[in-house]
Amino acid sequence: MLIAANFKTNKTRCQTAAYYKEVSDFIAAKNINTEAMIFPPATALDSFEGKISVGAQNAYAVENGAYTGEIGLEQLDEFGIKTILIGHSERRHILGESQELIAEKFHYYKEKGFRIVYCIGEPLEVREESSAALMAYLDDQLEGIDLAYNKLIIAYEPVWAIGSGLTPTEGEVELIHTALRQKIKAPILYGGSVKTANAKELLSLNNVDGALIGSGALNAEDYCMILEIADSLK
Ligand code: 13P
């Protein structure tokens, strides 16, 4: 089981360090075996010491160079970061990343041996169309991605469930994860309005191997509570 927290554009360097320490202390005190992973904003990346994996929310497919506003491999190497989030719906839909660019990033960071948390998820209008349209949409988001990569982790995050407090029914989540499992051996996380109140139900579903959490994990205590729930399910 893997519980990942995506901070998005939240938390300063100082707040991230305090969060890391609070969660690390909790993991040690409670002897938690579930993997904890956090994605702080780029400005808060650092060489943390502890049991929480730290990943980048984004980086350009380059070592360094003239790409104003981007970070590359060099900035991640400085802190020994070997995990990256690629294809998040906010980067696809708000920042306008194309599948081509996303696949390029995937290949670059795969080549560099990174663990890649690769996000897919459909907007509401696609879900409302049909199950076939939904699966076809997810298939398109997997185009150009090596599903056999041994450091791949998939995160299924329906766009309409992100930050909205809405989630698909447990049956729907299980159905989609099980359909994805037919073609993907990698762990499949669920994301979209996961919180302390629904974590147990969602994490208990077949083919749900963990969660990718935004707002519900911003508070370190809540995140610790979800780690404890995940740990109790094993
Ligand atoms: P919320 O947990 O805030 O819905 O965000 C989910 C998400 O986008 C994690 O990457």
Image (tube, rainbow, N blue to C red):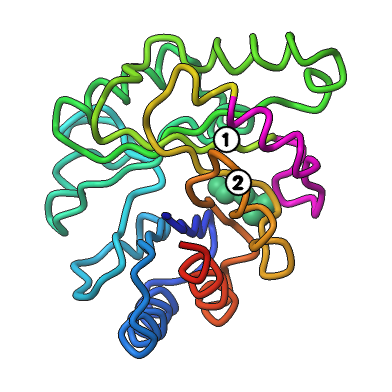
**In the rendered picture of this protein, how many numbered marks are placed on residues?**
2
Which residue is the site of mark 2?
A: 191
Question: Dividing the picture into quarters, in which one does residue 201 lie?
Answer: bottom right
Left of 129 or right of it: where is 72?
Answer: left
Q: Position of residue 186 (x, y in %)?
A: 37, 32
**Looking at the rendering, which quadrant does residue 17 occupy?**
bottom left
Earlier-in-chain disc, 2 versus 1:
1
**Amino acid marked by disc 1:** Tyr
Q: Residues within 10 Å of mark 2 (few under 14, many from 20)?
A: many
Residue ID at (37%, 16%): 145
Q: Amino acid at mark 2?
A: Gly
Do the numbered discs 2 and 1 sit on residues whose CB atoms are within 8 Å? yes
Q: Main secondary structure of the magenta part?
A: helix
In this view, the residue in front, 144 or 197, is 197
- In this picture, which residue range is highlighted in magenta? 159-178
**Residue tagged by mark 1?**
156
Give the SS element for disc 1.
strand
Along the viewing direction, whichever of 3 and 43 lies nearer the viewer = 3
